[in-house]
Image (cartoon, rainbow, N blue to C red):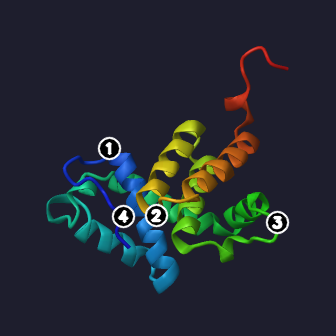
Amino acid sequence: MKPPLNESRPLAPRSAARLTAVQALYQMDLAETDLNSVIGQFNLMHFGDKAEDPSVANADRDFFASILRGVVRRQREIDPIVDAQLAEGWRLTRVDSTLRAILRAGVFELIERTDVPARVVISEYVEVAKAFFSEDEPRVVNGVLDKIARRTREAEFTAPGDS
């Protein structure tokens, strides 16, 4: 799974970390690869001077690893949160594997990485979705993450003076 990236322009370190975290979560989901093995493989093949894709070579490795570890650690909490926002009759397990990885990573950041503004999280994962999909999926990511953000980080969406 390789997204169509503009290799002439490197992504910002955290953006690159998010994109590669989604790729790693996808790999872990399909191949049932061990967390530490995937982190090691990505550090060796995707980041730094030996990177296969120069647009993600400067990824923030610590941020990448924290997303992966966080999604794995909190997946039993994350999946029901996403399930509750999907259309009637849809469960996260029925969603495309790449879309599932994007939603899990985005929800992890929303519930645990409060140092990153919710709107930034949503915007970043919509961009990740656009790297993989050209149809409705980026809108799905936007809608699901926005609903979750408004519930989990209500204060960020309430204008000053609102009561």
Whole-percent x and y of residue 90?
A: 75, 70
What residue is pinned by disc 3? 88
Closer to us: 94 or 13: 94
Q: Is residue 33 left or right of residue 74?
A: left
Q: Residue furthest bottom?
A: 31
Residue 4 % position (x, y): 33, 61
Could you tell me the amino acid type at mark 3? Glu
Mark 2: amino acid: Val
Report how far apart the C-alphas of labels 3 and 1 lie in the structure. Answer: 36 Å
| Circle nearer the N terminus (3, 4) | 4
* Mark 1 or mark 2: whose residue is earlier in sequence: 1
Q: Which type of secondary structure does the marked residue at label 4 adopt?
A: loop
Earlier in the chain: of badge 3 and badge 1, it is: 1
Q: Quadrant of the C terminus?
A: top right
Mark 1 and mark 2: span between their CA atoms?
16 Å
Tell whether 65 sits left or right of 94: left
Q: How far is disc 3 from disc 4 in space, using C-alphas?
A: 29 Å
Q: Mark 4 is on which residue type?
A: Pro
* Mark drawn on residue 128: none
To which residue does mark 1 refer? 12
Q: Which residue is mark 2?
A: 22
Q: How many marks?
A: 4
Which element carries disc 3, helix, strand or loop?
loop
Label 2 – label 3 distance at C-alpha: 25 Å
- Name the kind of residue labelled 1 in the image: Ala
Q: Residue at x 56, y 45 (%)?
A: 122
**Mark 2 element type:** helix
